[in-house]
Image (cartoon, helix red, strand yellow):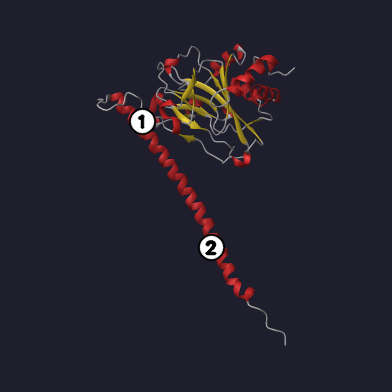
Amino acid sequence: MNPLSDLVTWRSDAECAQLAERFQSAHPFPHVSIDNFFSPTFVEWLIADFPKSGNVDYDRFCEGEGEGAGTRRNYANGTPDAFPPAFRQLDALSRDPDFLTYLSRITGIAALEFDPDYFGAGLRESRNGATLPPHLDFNYHPKTLTHRRLNFLLYLNPDWKAEWGGNLEVHLDPNVHRHRSLISSFVPIANRVLIFETSEVSWHAFDRVNAPDDLGRRAWSIYFYTRDRDGSDEIKRRNTEYVEPPLPERFQPGRVLDEDDVAFLEEILHRRDLRIAMLYDMRRGFDDKYSRLWNEYEYYLEKYRQSQPSIDTPADPAP
């Protein structure tokens, strides 16, 4: 018997067929939310084993606005060798062929492959003030160049309330629909899994976390890939693309800004500036790379031109 089988609440064939129908028919892209996905005992172990703030193993994976960011610093661990024991079990389960087949039955996506690099995935804890604007995920693995097909998100927050934020949101294209892009949202309660297909329309986000100070939004994620996909010749390689949401409706002509308003505006401007700086860095890298390629091209082109007279001059006529 598979030693990992007790970790999952396996659904029957009939239940998997119902989940597959929900997944494929979901609007505006295939997705499904499943409660009690794993066994209660296993989820209790995962919750208890999640790294705690202040621990050395926690702090070395923190991201934030410098050392003084305090509770605004967020934990992001995508290094399996540094996972606590419960999450190493979850890692082992996620690579297991039986589990991959199970996901294929739920989603209809065959030949799924696990990502041992956890590129962009792993353990996450988002503190108060954290938010993730609507975005499309990168669609190719940077090393294997396989197609990213499936996001698998597990939430680990007992008794989490919707008003605390951090709710996973499903969006239409926010470039087009702006204030009306939000379709649905899911509270990140413990043992809830959200599975969705990664595609050119799978816009998603989570809203601002505003929980009690001793709590953070905890999640674990893994992404699955396939060697090929329908229409792959027409799919352009893409990095993650973000769209900042429009200003909240409270910002109307004549409004007097309070401290929270100013802090909000400073934050979104800072986020915008960080993304602009990132694009400039990428541009500098591309400029350097392609200028060297152009110089090489010019070099070999000139060598070719120099060789042309000897090639083009006709041979002396025979006597």
Disc 1 to disc 2: CB gap under 8 Å: no
Image location of residue 288, percent across then percent down: 48, 52
**Residue on which disc 1 sits:** 267
Q: Disc 1 marks which amino acid?
A: Glu
Report the residue that reaches farthest toward the right.
Answer: 1
Up/down of 229 relative to 218, above or below = below
Q: Quadrant of the N terminus?
A: top right
Residue at 59% x, 13% y is 36
Give the Cα distance between marks 1 and 2: 46 Å
**Residue on which disc 2 sits:** 298
Image location of residue 310, percent across then percent down: 63, 75
Residue at 55% x, 60% y is 297
Residue at 42% x, 15% y is 163
Q: Quadrant of the C terminus?
A: bottom right
**Quadrant of residue 11 within the rendered picture:** top right
Q: Is residue 4 left or right of residue 276?
A: right
In front here: 285 or 215? 285
